[in-house]
Image (tube, grey):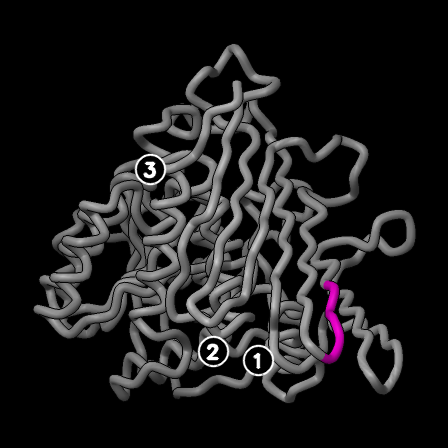
Amino acid sequence: MAAADFNRADGMNYAPVSVVKPKPVCGPGEFIFAVMALDHGHIYGQTNGLLEAGGTLKWVYDPDPAKVEAFVKAYPSVQVASSPEVVLEDKEVRLVAAAAIPNERAALGMRVMDHGKDYFTDKTPFTTLEQLDAARRKADETGKKYMVYYSERLHVESAVYAGQLIAEGAIGRVLQVLGTGPHRLNKPSRPDWFFRKEQYGGILCDIGSHQIEQFLFFAGCKDATVAHSKVANYNNPDVPELEDFGDATLIGDNGATNYFRVDWFTPDGLGTWGDGRTIILGTDGFIELRKYIDIGRDKQGGHVYLANGEGEYHFAVNGQIGYPFFGELILDCLNRTENAMTQAHAFKAAELCLKAQNAAVRIV
């Protein structure tokens, strides 16, 4: 198995590879998947995760030969499909993973589901509530999955470990989740669609989707309301449709609250694409995640800080936990279960990021 670069400098091409020896959940050929729409580099992370969990990659399709060439270089055993139909009509293919331009993800997903296959898309899965409603109906109609790569929880070992600590009761009932999701802009390397709001959906819809999904998961919420949200373009007047800052406050259906900030202001001197952090407050303690770097101390991420009634703890978990989501997803597809992520959760996170985006006050 070849793997894409673990690119710490560029979030768009950040593709984690498990250091923990992968534990495949199925044998070769038992779960065949294909890849389509290589518009975002997250497709490499999606592919790595599925391969490490035992999936067999059969096809890749994209209309851009350069994107296909790069993908084949990373995964030389993959076959190049001459058209989307080659992938969609192959009865061996159980799931299609894709990272299309955001406003095209829903249409592709429904086409995949209509062909009897599960769909695994990069976040954000939708750019409008109308797309979400259509996908909900399609999932109900076909019984197929519309799963989402919320990578800032699913492909981050510190976040996986935090979920385990919370489930074990380490901090009691979760009361609040505070998240920061700064990203490096790398403006010259971004495609044109990245700067068109109709196509990328807005900052709260896009990278804000990670933050809302984490809140729902860590706080155990099935629903939430958006209390307030804001967006701005502070520093990029040459691309007026870009939002380089956004924040929001949410209130969960169980009383837990959330505040998050996302932005495109990671300085060039930082050793990674963004100093993503999460602080989770509970009745009996708190957890802080320093996901990608411990600034000024450790260039590696994966730091979990815990304080509770028993004491203060620091866990360096990179290479210790792995990424169980991908194996659980494969088994869910094979067994028609919902252990990796429920369909309701995937859609609810998408719904709330769209509502936060739609309600946002524009500052500048």
**Disc 2 residue crowd, few under 14, some 14–19, many 20+, Cα 10 Å:** many
Q: How many marks on residues?
A: 3
Secondary structure type for disc 1? loop
In this picture, residue 93 sits left or right of residue 323: left
Query: In the rendered structure, are the residues bearing label 1 and label 2 in contact, judged by CB atoms less than 8 Å apart?
Result: yes
Relative image position of residue 28 (x, y in whole percent): 38, 83
The answer for how far apart the CA atoms under marks 3 and 2 are is: 28 Å
Residue beneath label 2, please? 53
Going by the numbered disc 1, the residue's amino acid type is Pro
Relative image position of residue 128 (x, y in whole percent): 26, 42
Residue beneath label 3, please? 65
Q: Residue at x 23, y 52 (%)?
A: 132
Relative image position of residue 360 (x, y in whole percent): 43, 34
Q: Residue at x 48, y 58 (%)?
A: 251
Look at discs 1 and 3 and give the one toward the viewer: 1
Q: Residue at x 20, y 50 (%)?
A: 108
Bounds of the magenta segment:
284-288
Residue beneath label 1, please? 22
**Which one is nearer the viewer's eye here, 281 or 145?**
281
Q: Overall secondary structure of the magenta stretch?
A: strand
Residue 113 appears in which quarter of the rendering? bottom left
**Disc 3 residue crowd, few under 14, some 14–19, many 20+, Cα 10 Å:** few
In this picture, residue 212 sits left or right of residue 332: right
Is residue 82 visible from the viewing direction of this image?
A: no
Q: Residue at x 47, y 72 (%)?
A: 254
